[in-house]
Amino acid sequence: MKKLLTYIGLFTAILAAPGCKKYLETLPDNRTVITTPAQVTQLLTTAYPHASYMLFCEAMSDNVEDKGNTGVGIDPQTFLINTQTFKYQDADDISADGPIAYWDSCYAAIAVANQALSYCSGPDSANYSAQKGEALVCRAYAHFMLVTLFAKAYNPTTAASDPGVPYMTTISTSVFNKYDRGTVAAVYQKIESDLTTGLPLLKDELYASAPKYHFTRQAAHAFAARFYLFKRDYAKVVEHSTAVFGSASPANLIRDQDAFYGMSYDNMVIYYNHASNPANILLQEAPGTKYPDNYYSYRYGIGTQINQEYFLSNNVTGGSLAMSIYGSGPQYFNFPKFKGDVTVMSLLSMDEVLLNRVEANIRLKNYSAAITDMNTWVSKNISNYNPSRHNVTISKMMNFYGLPQDESMIETALYMKRVTYMQEGLRWFDILRLDIPVVHTGSPGFSTTLAPGDKRRLLQLPAEAVNDGMALNPR
């Protein structure tokens, strides 16, 4: 195979000096030569976004309220991002927990994936098929996260005209290129092509030493389930979700919250994002993030109202959630998910896959399958679970929500996902996908409503995108 100079070090350079390099610049480092499939596999460890979206996604969601604390003792840059995104202002800080850093990190990951793909062609390309598969799925994932956060949510009636994000498939050798955003529909088409081409090529045996830090087939199916939920192809959501579980019972794979909350706090914060936890499918490090150190103490987060409404009041099961909030008061409310000196975060996990399948089956009118999966979740999330008292039924859901059958079932599925992923940012993705309105109220005298179709649902592109020929999102 033709020897090519590798792109080692771009990701590190971007994190070390965000904003100093153009985010689409991919000029190679000439220190290392890659000649084997194993070296390409190693290169691909940097083909994943290594920045966190959790801070700004959580702050924009309806999981937060104004707790009134001043931010004393909190990292000032991330406190600013928490404030700006709660108020739906464009967060222009370049620290590792902000939208700009996440944009940069995704394109850095894409650049590495493209560099890896350049090694996977040639007369011995068959020996690199698994690496090609991982690179394609990595490229698809990073572009999906970008188009989800920086463009309009996929709508089949408008996607062909809604501006997307640049889909990078080649290695740039110039910093003066002009980039076309294309359309959301075009980006989705390319994501789907990369995903469906790459997934069958994956070989799990390559990742025996650290399988949860790579796109195994299971992880790729989990990503596919999320992608097709956004694309509204519900039959494929069911197909890929089912492939994630394989022959295993979902009850043995999702988070057993009743058992988890019986652990000591120190063990919980270690185990939640640990590779030994069967609920975790894809893990990655975000070495620059301050989120694990500060997530419980931001001004805009879970306070008394959210705690009362979602964790202390009645819920559709009629039982008490096993999940409970820690912290000395609303200024420090937290779920034991992150250890401050550990920056590993779960990007894909079993509960999301299960609940994506629930929603897809509801929309496909497969009600019995949806209810079975719902009650699997109930069995692991309700204290002193008793199926005769706690299992959900169609009539129980309709009585609780006072809505028609399908709407009540969808609300139940969204509730389950929402409480599962509190403080992890995932709720924002459902808000985007379903155009859910959000009301944010703070003091002194701040109040705003994020109505359906609001332009502020789209994160703003970095200002330097204008220099690359891209129009910013309207405001």
Image (spheres, grey):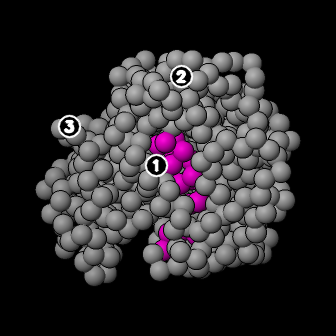
> Which range is magenta?
136-155
User: For this rendering, which residue is in front, 340 or 166?
Assistant: 166
Give the mark toward the camera: 3 or 1.
Answer: 1
Residue flagged by tag 1: what amino acid is it?
Asp
Characterize the local packing of mark 1: few (<14), some (14-19) or many (20 or more) Cα atoms within 10 angstroms.
many
Is residue 15 rendered to the left or right of residue 183? right
Is residue 407 rendered to the left or right of residue 114? left
Residue flagged by tag 3: what amino acid is it?
Ala
Q: Residue at x 20, y 37 (%)?
A: 248
Characterize the local packing of mark 3: few (<14), some (14-19) or many (20 or more) Cα atoms within 10 angstroms.
few
Residue flagged by tag 2: what amino acid is it?
Met
Q: Residue at x 16, y 52 (%)?
A: 387
Characterize the local packing of mark 2: few (<14), some (14-19) or many (20 or more) Cα atoms within 10 angstroms.
few
Q: Identify the element where label 2 is drawn.
A: loop
User: What residue does disc 1 label?
Assistant: 194
Q: Residue at x 72, y 70 (%)?
A: 473
User: What residue does disc 3 label?
Assistant: 248
